[in-house]
Image (tube, grey):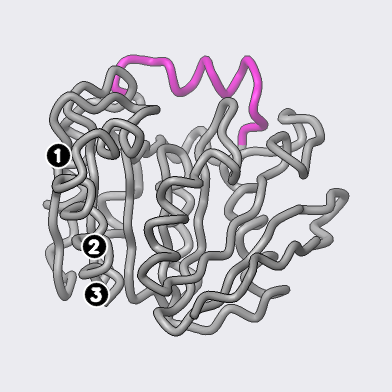
Amino acid sequence: MLQPAVPFSVAHEQAVLRGDATQGPGGNVLLLHGAGASARDKFSILRGALAARSVGMTCFDCIGHGETGGDMADSSLASRTRQARSVIGHRAIGEPLALLGFSMGAYNAIKLTQSHAVASLVLVVPGVFTPEAYDVPFGPRFSQVIRRERSWSDTDAWNILSRFKGRLLVIAAGNDAVIPREIPERLVESASSAEWRRLLVVPRAEHRHLFSLLLEQPREFDATIDLIMHCLN
């Protein structure tokens, strides 16, 4: 039986990260949310579906988001990876990890495989970035770098995933106006050493409404959650 969510706070550099965690016999997954208005409270549908299968989750709001708040300019891609490491350490999440990353958070999940043992990697509408943008604070300069045409094509994500030996599931939205289809396809292709890998494209889904659309199609929704569970093993 899944235990109730327990709020937590993690001191990180000059900020305090806010989050909550549930524990269950089906394991625990660290969720990494995306950019913009994203925060951990946007994932109630997915969290509920995994909770029904006794899978707990550790979720936190990055700097500039949700309950953590703060100035987005005080964060960056590199900072978000460090924030995740702080949460992993504070919560003493055992390795190998199970990571579930959305959009920008998918890139942070990929980067975490360089410093932690990761058994399962679920990447949903994944974004990847040029190394040039990694340490640039969020703001006008960051936007200028990533908005160059195909700026993502020289990302280190391809090479990182080529060394990944765990289980990989990439879920793409069929009508994603943010992430080019080439990105999720190439992520799966790059993971040539993975124990198991799969690309799932959800037809008609958009970048920000994938799981809410699936809810309108119960059989497809259950099949997607079953595939996530298969990746989590």
| Nearer to us in this view, 132 or 120 | 120
Front tag of 1 and 2: 1
Q: Magenta residues, as a range?
A: 136-150
Marks 3 and 2, Cα distance to the nearest angstrom?
9 Å
| Nearer to us in this view, 227 or 48 | 48
> Residue 165 got which mark?
3
- Specify whether 150 is left or right of 59: left
**Residue contact at pointers 1 and 2, CB within 8 angstroms:** no
Type of residue at label 2? Leu
**Residue at left 27%, top 55%?**
159
**Residue contact at pointers 3 and 2, CB within 8 angstroms:** no
- Find residue 67 and report its horizontal and vertical position in percent: 76, 42
Image vertical order of residue 29 relative to residue 34, above or below:
below
Q: Local crowd at mark 1 within 10 Å, few (<14), some, or many (≥20)?
A: some
Is label 2 in a helix, a strand or a loop? strand
Residue tagged 1? 201
Question: Quadrant location of the C terminus?
Answer: bottom left
For marks 1 and 2 on the same chain, the one whose residue lies earlier in the sequence = 2
